[in-house]
Image (cartoon, helix red, strand yellow):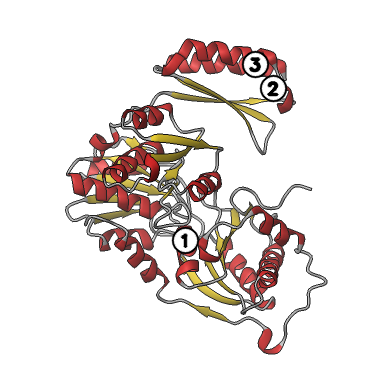
Amino acid sequence: MARLFGTDGVRGLANAELTPELALALAASAARVLAAHDRSHRPVAVVGRDPRASGEMLEAAVVAGLASAGADVLRVGVLPTPAVAYLVGALEADLGVMISASHNPMPDNGIKLFAAGGHKLPDSIEDEIEAGLNGEAAVRPTGTGVGRVSDVPDALDRYADHLVQATPHPLAGLKLVVDCANGASSLAAPEIYRRAGAEVIALYASPDGVNINEHCGSNHPEALRAAVVEHGADLGIAHDGDADRCVAVDAAGELVDGDQIMAVLALALSETGELAKDTLVATVMSNLGLHLAMRAHGITVVTTSVGDRYVLEELRASGFALGGEQSGHVVFPAYATTGDGLLTALRLMSRMAATGKPLGELAAVMNRLPQVLVNVPVADKAAVASSVEVRDAVGAVEAELGDEGRVLLRPSGTEQLVRVMVEAPAQSTAQEAADRLAGVVSAVS
């Protein structure tokens, strides 16, 4: 049987794959596992959600599951995922539950769990929770042993205060357009950016439970790009449904992706001596242009597998200060235990305010090389991985590109696909090489 937990919690079509019964069982099992690991006190769990319609149903199930297993529940309502992670630590809770499917379309939903301190659960604990899902043998508490449920009315204020304090320079004078994706940041993002001093124009900040991520947000920044130009704003910020990521738009309406944001922030931290070991953590999908830009400024780039959990693991294991993904997941371990799109945007705007430079000029430190990604359907991913023909073809392209390009072949973790990625100085060069390698991969599989 496939593992229930993916790289970012449990996700599926709400009320079909991710049912209230599963949500209740998952929450109850999580509470029992935590209680077994620490019997010194009654477990406390923080529960938040994004505004999609099924979140109301799943929140009720999660809260019931936690309370039925003897955990006290602190409901924080609709808040970004990183806010829930922060509040787990700030409220000294033992567990955090975020109900969201992030950038996925509205019919989907998900359940993400955080350990004490707001950190992602280790695989071993997730496995224990999954193993305890049936729960038939569990002794349910009764009477005063049943968990109590209460709300945290100042949850947003606590998170806002934390982020404003983590912003090193006031944002007065900056005009911002923010696309909230009709998601979890719809109230939080405009409020927090205004508290930090920016003039804010909010787009897609009217969630109705159905319109989350619908032709808006970080996956669809087209309207944001137009709005920045129309309003004469200094920049635009686009969040996804749960606001753990962001991408930016400069004053000319040009997209600034996660790699470029990391380049700007790495240089800022390096100048102040805060970039531990002068090292940035990125995934293998980050653009070669990021590596070249960092090399030119004496900054090392350590790469991980694709997925923010692998970036987080490297940051924690090695004590680094900044890491992230091209998609806009950026992590500052000194201030957050997970990717935080609002924190990232605040730090980016703080850099603009401190230097007096427009975002386009700051982002120009990195020359983003054309990147072509081809998904090749295959019958046998292992055959591709062991193929001499594929290895020789990759070697030939790498020799042609030299230091000015890069090749990456990566099997999909969930589908019968091999992803062929090529970067080169020219789009046509990258496309030709990617198509050529895709043909070889297809032929041997």
From the viewer's perspective, is the residue at label 3 or at label 1 nearer?
Answer: 3
- Which residue does the numbered mark 2 point to in the structure image? 384
Q: Is residue 360 above or below residue 423?
A: below
The residue under label 3 is which amino acid type? Val
Evaluate if marks 3 and 1 touch, with contact meaning CB atoms under 8 Å apart.
Answer: no
Q: Where does residue 229 sit, x and y in percent of width and height?
A: 24, 40
- Which residue does the numbered mark 1 point to in the structure image? 208
Per the image, label 1 sits on a secondary structure element best described as loop
Q: Mark 2: few, some, or many residues within 10 Å (few <14, many ≥20)?
A: many
Q: Of 401 and 280, which appears nearest the observer? A: 280
Q: Which mark is residue 390?
A: 3
Q: Where does residue 74 sit, x and y in percent of width and height?
A: 53, 75
Per the image, label 2 sits on a secondary structure element best described as helix
* Distance between mark 3 and mark 1 Cα atoms: 49 Å
* Distance between mark 2 and mark 3 Cα atoms: 7 Å
Residue shown at the point (17%, 53%) measured from the top left: 173
* Distance between mark 2 and mark 1 Cα atoms: 46 Å
Nearer the N terminus, badge 2 or badge 3? 2
In which quadrant of the rendered image does the C terminus lie?
Answer: top right
The residue under label 1 is which amino acid type? Asp
- The residue furthest right is 137
From the viewer's perspective, is the residue at label 2 or at label 1 nearer?
Answer: 2
